[in-house]
Image (cartoon, rainbow, N blue to C red):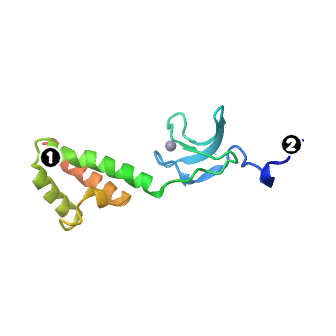
Amino acid sequence: MNDQAHGNDPLPIGTKLDHPCPECGETMVLRESKFGLFYGCSAFPKCKAAHGAHKDGKPLGIPADKMTKKARMDAHEVFDQLWKGKHMARGEAYQWMQEAMEMTEEEAHIGRFDADQCEELVHKVEMYLEEKEDK
Ligand SMILES: [Zn+2]
C-alpha cells in the first residue's frame, strides 16, 4: 500500500515560483527531469536558468545575497575596465566612482554595494566608456 507521502501532495508541474528568473526576469516554473523536480525559466531554451526544488516541489531556499554577490562581480568586472584600460589610473578610477555614485571614500567599495547600486555603477561606467570611445 502506498501511504500518501506525509499527507501533503507534491506541487503540480507548472507551478510558478514566486521569484522571477534571476537571469532574465521571466517566470520560473516547476518542471520534471530524470533527476527530479526543478524550477526552470519559462524562456527556455533561450534562457537556461534553473532553480532546485525539493521532492514535494517546494523551491530550495534562495539565498538573498546570491544575486547581490553576482551583481558585485559583474560591477567589478565593468568597473575594472576603467583602470585596466587606458582611461585612468586605479586611484583615479576609485575617485571617479565616488563622484559618479555620490559617495564618500568610505562608502565607495563595490563589496559594500547592494544589487541596485551595482547596477547603477555598471550603467555609469558604460556611459563613461561609450562617451570616451565614440569620438
Ligand atoms: Zn530566464
The residue at which mark 2 appears reads as 2
| Residue 9 visible in the current orientation | yes
Does residue 50 appear to the left or right of 55 in the view shown? left
Q: Quadrant of the N terminus?
A: top right
Task: Using the image, determine if residue 47 lies above or below residue 118.
Answer: above
At 85% across and 47% down in the image, what residue appears? 3
Q: Earlier in the sequence, mark 1 or mark 2?
A: 2
Does residue 85 appear to the left or right of 56 in the view shown? left
Q: Position of residue 78 (x, y in %)?
A: 26, 46
Extreme-top residue of the structure: 34
Callout 1 amino acid: Trp
Q: Position of residue 35 (x, y in %)?
A: 63, 34
Q: Position of residue 66 (x, y in %)?
A: 43, 52
Q: Position of residue 62 (x, y in %)?
A: 52, 53
At 53% across and 33% down in the image, what residue appears? 45
The residue at which mark 1 appears reads as 83
